Image: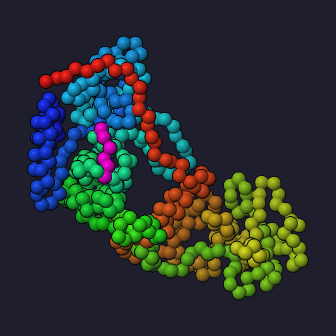
Amino acid sequence: MALIDALIDKIADPALRQALRDQISTMLMKQSFGLVYQQHKPETVELPQYKVRRGSKVRIPSEATDDLYDVERVEGGTVTIVSQSVEPERWEIERSEVVVVREFGEPIYPGLRSVGTVSEGGEKPPHLVINAENFHALETLLYTHENKIDAIYIDPPYNTGNRDWKYNNDYVDGVDQFRHSKWLAFMERRLTLARRLLKNNGVLIVTIDEHEVDNLGLLLRQTLPEADIQRVTMVINPKGNNQNQFSRVDEYGFFCFHGGATAIDGPDSGLGDVANSDPVWTMLMRRGSNSLRKDRPTMFYPTIVDTETEKIIDAGDALESTASRSSVRPRQGTRFVWPIRTDQSEGRWQIGRERLLEQLGEGTIKLGSRGGIQYVPDKGRKAIKDGSIEVIGIAPDGSLRLRWNGKTITPKTVWFRAAHNAATFGTDLLTALLGVRNQFPPRRRPRHRAHRLGHQRYA
């Protein structure tokens, strides 16, 4: 189909060009049963560090469209470019305003160049982030990692119809009658490379929403016929998103298992079922009855946190029943955490100071994610000793990493976890970090300014 499109573009008679396009469109509407799509014109990739030479193919990044031009002449800081159209036009433009591009099939010899490192993991295995056009990054990895990767996770463009991703030198949007076909061609190229990178017992995971979920499922079964493929529904927005007749709360993930790869049982099913409902860690501040300072004055004391490391390092003495918190102050470089309730009244801790220091030494006291104090109660401490709770590591703050041992449950095909909430752990999290909402608006590109030299018509 790409070749036919290119041949039709060369026809000078506009009426004949349109008549042929109309007939081909009618023919394409009569599709066979199953997943039928066209292998569209190849994609392009920008090479901003390539020198602009005569004969180069270039794009103007500042232009509203993604049209390609041929470089006819380079003279000093100015280049003459010719449009790739039935009636070519010549333009004169500054060399700095164009960038060299390559289409798929043209030779590209990519290489990796280190731009910086971050070392925080100690002796743990390192991670590598590759900033590149994803197709060519996958091709590069084939030289060193073909059939060597255990798992690949892909989060592709969802093809929602918004003008938010580019393909085939043009935007793929909701009014493009071939937008599903173009998206499938885009995905097939990358899935084929990903399969070559996977081990024979590797797993490929692809997330998607309702716009292409059905097409993607068919494409995966067509591209990976040997895989055991299962779809998981993930609740990402419990409040719902009103788009059509129903309020959408979910997205999907396809898991493609190869060879002997399989999902393993874990501590929870993803839908709320847990192998052991008893929490290992619980809040140190007492709740419910008998939970005020006056009820147990000896359990009203400050825990001391190092302000640089955010670790609990000590605990202060219990205050006299009539003493104010302001009567004691933390030493330099530390801060106090008191058992203060949500209504700002004074509560109390579950355990006394001596017991807290004992558990701090054994790693069963820690600072919670929201600033509160957490601890392992007696039942959990006994379970650690008898092996019911397994110690799987030590956190940077010295607290133990714990999990219930030997009690697992099979994952289900619907996941409903708080950590998957895209609003809480996406938009809201970024807003909390940056202080302002929606800091990443779509970029609007101005049109370039160039001097038109005239055009020549080719028959």
Point 71% across, 53% down: residue = 308
Q: Quadrant of the C terminus?
A: top left
Q: Position of residue 178 (x, y in %)?
A: 23, 49
Q: Quadrant of the N terminus?
A: top left
Q: Position of residue 111 (x, y in %)?
A: 37, 33
Residue at the far top in the pictured view: 75
Direction front: furthest residue: 15
Q: Residue at x 47, y 70 (%)?
A: 239
Query: Which residue is at 15% across, 34% downward?
Result: 14
- Residue 171 lies in the magenta stretch: yes
Magenta-colored span: 169-174
How many numbered circles does the render carry?
0
Image location of residue 109, percent across then percent down: 31, 31
Closer to us: 90 or 373:
90
Residue 152 appears in the picture as rendered: no
Instruction: Say whether residue 374 is left or right of residue 214.
Output: right
| Viewer-closest of 398 and 276 | 276
The magenta stretch spans residue 227: no
Compared across the picture, whether 245 is left or right of 383 comes to: left
Task: Compare residues 58 and 452 and report the one nearer the observer.
Answer: 452
Side of 138 where 369 appears, left or right: right
Q: Is residue 78 something one can see in this rendering?
A: yes
Magenta span main SS: loop
Residue at (32, 49) in percent of width and height? 173
- Residue 179 x/y as whole percent: 26, 50
Judge from the rendering whether residue 227 lies leftward or rightward of residue 253; answer left or right: left
Query: Residue 220, located in which quarter of the rendered image?
Result: bottom left
* Model colouring: rainbow
